[in-house]
Image: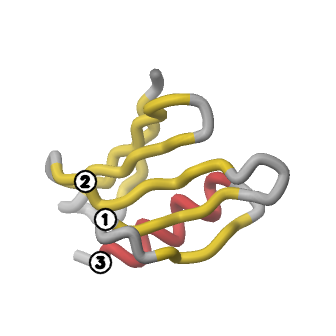
Amino acid sequence: MSIITHHKSETRTISWLAEQAGLWVARRDGDFVGMVEARWGSGFAATTRLAKPLGTFETVEEAQHALEESVGD
């Protein structure tokens, strides 16, 4: 398991945890805010905490960024 942290703003941090191969979970202030899941061979799908699909992206970083942008402050 590894943690990758991205900063949304100076006061709000989104932390990413690789829960298992191909699954990254995002938390802010300890609360689940969404996830990115590898679609083996077809990119990375991002979904919000309410399971709203945000799209499928070429890289995990693009998918994580889309989720971070959807969270807001």
* Label 2 with label 1: CB-CB less than 8 Å: yes
| Towards the viewer: 51 or 24 | 51
Which quadrant of the figure has residue 45? bottom right
Say which label, 3 or 1, has the lower sequence index.
Answer: 1
Say which label, 2 or 1, has the lower sequence index.
Answer: 2
Q: Amino acid at mark 3?
A: Gly
Residue 21 placement, left or right of 41: left
Residue at 42% across, 51% down = 6
Q: Position of residue 27 (x, y in %)?
A: 28, 50
Residue at 84% across, 51% down = 41
Q: Position of residue 73 (x, y in %)?
A: 22, 75
Give the mark toward the camera: 3 or 2.
2
Q: Position of residue 57 (x, y in %)?
A: 70, 66
Give the mark toward the camera: 3 or 1.
1
Name the residue carrying label 2. Answer: 32
Name the residue carrying label 1. Answer: 49
| Towards the viewer: 65 or 9 | 65
The residue most toward the right is 41
Q: Amino acid at mark 1?
A: Arg
Which quadrant of the figure has residue 34? bottom left
Name the residue carrying label 3. Answer: 72
Q: Amino acid at mark 2?
A: Phe
Residue at 25% across, 53% down = 32
Q: Position of residue 30 (x, y in %)?
A: 16, 46
| Towards the viewer: 39 or 10 | 39
- Helix, strand or loop at label 3? It is loop
Distance in Å between CA atoms under marks 3 and 2: 14 Å
